[in-house]
Amino acid sequence: MTDTIERALAEIKFDRDGLVPATAQQHDTGEILMVAWMNRDAVRVTLTEGRACYWSRSRAKLWRKGETSGQVQLLREMRLDCDGDTVLLLVDQKGVACHTGRRSCFFRAWRDGGWAVIAEPQIDPEILYPDRAG
Amino acid sequence: MTDTIERALAEIKFDRDGLVPATAQQHDTGEILMVAWMNRDAVRVTLTEGRACYWSRSRAKLWRKGETSGQVQLLREMRLDCDGDTVLLLVDQKGVACHTGRRSCFFRAWRDGGWAVIAEPQIDPEILYPDRAG
């Protein structure tokens, strides 16, 4: 298993910070949920555990998506682009992807000269992250 | 027009190289076509001209998608994520997105311990880029 995953990693070209952008897409609807970053360990964890794990640049640590909120992303398939420097995760998103409580992080659209909010939260963020609610 | 686009740019958080990752999605089918990079000028051109323009890191220049191949991406909508550090382009892709002649750059899938090629070229790259064929 480990050797196999090392072969997967060998084809991925990480940047000078050891990261690649990862786009997460809901496998059946095609909805783009979020874009985050993965390092080698995040790829290892994602393939081993079958759920999306990213590298949090702000917290400088591995971030198993949903570890706090419960809103996990079960991995359906990992894909790699032609240049090998960005990955696509087809996932089954439990609940919502965005920390604001919205299904997708891409809830702002450039319309009529402004960033329009095109989706409302489905869950109160304070329910997702009770420890942060103060 | 210019002032308006500057307001759009003000909400985008470019990285230390002045770039953000941009995911291009076919607007009607939901297919992920590619992920590339945009700087401020690429965003300006994309919003002004209504077609996707990226920053080519390898060539260190603006890259109007399709300028050589004719495989342009007409912009349907630009979206911004919650953190403002990555954008999603909903586009209408003419022809194919990938320089290999495939519709999507994400034609490799991690299956059974290897990167499987899951799509074939629709167009010969030598037809897309005749000047490079020699």
Image (cartoon, coloured by chain):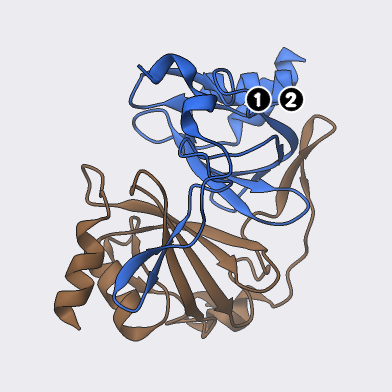
Chain colours: A blue, B brown
On-image quarter of the C terminus of chain A: top left
Q: Seen in the image, is A122 located left or right of residue A19?
A: right
The x, y position of residue B60, in whole percent, is 27, 60
- Residue where numbered disc 2 is placed: A50
- Label 1 lies in what chain? A
Q: Is residue B134 shown to the viewer in this render?
A: yes
Q: Seen in the image, is B108 located left or right of residue B83?
A: right
Residue A10: numbered disc: none
Cα distance in 3D space between marks 1 and 2: 5 Å
- Amino acid type for the residue under numbered disc 2: Gly
Q: Are marks 1 and 2 in contact (CB under 8 Å)?
A: yes
Mark 2 secondary-structure assignment = loop
**Residue situated in front as seen by the camera: A77 or B85:** B85
Above or below for A104 versus A36? below
Q: Is residue B98 shown to the viewer in this render?
A: no
The x, y position of residue B119, in whole percent, is 77, 60
**Residue situated in front as seen by the camera: A124 or A53:** A124
- Label 2 lies in what chain? A
The x, y position of residue A9, in whole percent, is 60, 28
| Residue drawn at point x = 39 percent, y = 83 percent | B50
Mark 1 secondary-structure assignment = helix
On-image quarter of the N terminus of chain A: top right
Residue A46: numbered disc: 1
Q: Quadrant of residue A89?
A: top right
